[in-house]
Image: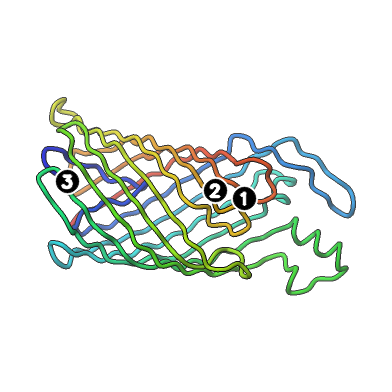
């Protein structure tokens, strides 16, 4: 989408403010280079494992349709799975599977030759299935029996309502800037925790040399910080992400991008944040 003299390339890293109809599919994989795993206690005996790896995969489908030149509706389906590559890290971190959907409206509220500003509002509904071996072992050892309160597998639904600002600013033919500020309110991943506020702030520096250098390749650099959704963590301990993107910008109705990111994420049972390196292939067909 072109704003002023700059043509922006879309990304899975953050949504854009443009009113148009498209279908998008993203598939990504990630791994933690090395995670320090604290000792795990099983049957009164401690087992140590100096480090391990966590791996995850994510899948996204999205469809947005433009109803008016200033209005679009959007729906997304998201799936995320995380597990460990060894027994002790698996006991410590378990297996997590999250699936859900998001829907909302996008409203263009301001536009000039160099800037586009849009507002988005909607809701998300997710269900997180957690296979927590450490919690199960500790609870059975303490109580001596299996009860609904110490089940190995738990599923927690959560619903959030959100509002969002999206901005795209054309600096020149080569450089553009996109910004996102999202605020949400709703349930956490702990059933007994109260509803709370969540936020996401992201910025992407979009580099498109296709006009000046006659190349169909674009680049992007980004930074994102967002509230950790796990209710057991401190609310101020945010997830931080850094983006590097390579994208194909040679077609108006098709976009293909490789999003490479580095994230630091606070996790249960770990003394420090875990670092993840991920790669996401993002494909978009514009109608």
Instruction: Give the CA separation, mark 1 to mark 3.
Output: 42 Å
Q: Earlier in the sequence, mark 1 or mark 2?
A: 2
Residue linked to disc 3: 115
Q: Of the numbered discs in the image, which one, if any, rests on residue 83?
A: 1
**Viewer-nearest residue: 226 or 194:** 194
Q: Quadrant of residue 11 in the image?
A: top left
Relative horizontal placement of residue 249, taking residue 188 as reference (left or right): left
Relative horizontal placement of residue 148, taking residue 209 as reference (left or right): right
Q: Earlier in the sequence, mark 1 or mark 3?
A: 1
> Are discs 1 and 2 less than 8 Å apart at CB?
yes
Percent position (x, y) of residue 154?
65, 67
Residue linked to disc 2: 56
**Viewer-nearest residue: 146 or 5:** 5
Q: Of the numbered discs in the image, which one, if any, rests on residue 131?
A: none
Percent position (x, y) of residue 238?
52, 47
User: Regarding mark 3 in the picture, which secondary structure is present there?
Assistant: strand
**Viewer-nearest residue: 80 or 185:** 185
User: Regarding mark 2 in the picture, which secondary structure is present there?
Assistant: strand
């Amino acid at each position: 989408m072109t704003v002023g003299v700059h043509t922006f390339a879309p990304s899975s890293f953050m949504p854009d403010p443009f009113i148009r109809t498209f279908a998008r599919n993203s598939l990504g994989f990630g791994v933690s280079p090395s995670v320090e795993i604290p000792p795990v206690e099983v049957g009164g005996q401690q087992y140590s494992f100096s480090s391990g790896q966590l791996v995850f995969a994510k899948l996204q489908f999205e469809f947005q349709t433009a109803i008016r030149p200033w209005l679009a509706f959007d729906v997304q389906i998201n799936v995320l799975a995380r597990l460990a590559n060894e027994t002790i890290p698996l006991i410590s971190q378990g297996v997590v599977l999250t699936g859900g959907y998001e829907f909302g409206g996008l409203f263009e509220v301001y536009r000039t030759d160099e800037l586009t500003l849009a507002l988005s509002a909607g809701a998300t509904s997710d269900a997180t299935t957690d296979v927590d071996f450490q919690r199960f072992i500790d609870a059975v050892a303490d109580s001596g029996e299996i009860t609904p309160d110490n089940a190995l597998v738990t599923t927690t639904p959560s619903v959030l309502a959100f509002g969002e600002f999206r901005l795209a600013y054309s600096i020149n033919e080569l450089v553009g800037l996109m910004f996102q500020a999202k605020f949400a309110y709703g349930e956490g991943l702990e059933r007994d925790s109260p509803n709370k506020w969540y936020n996401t702030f992201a910025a992407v520096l979009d580099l498109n040399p296709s006009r000046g250098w006659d190349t169909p390749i674009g680049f992007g650099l980004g930074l994102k910080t967002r509230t950790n959704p796990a209710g057991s963590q401190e609310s101020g301990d945010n997830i931080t992400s850094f983006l590097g993107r390579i994208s194909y910008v040679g077609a108006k109705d098709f976009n293909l991008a490789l999003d490479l990111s580095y994230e630091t994420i606070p996790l249960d049972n770990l003394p420090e944040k875990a670092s993840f390196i991920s790669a996401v292939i993002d494909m978009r067909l514009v109608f």
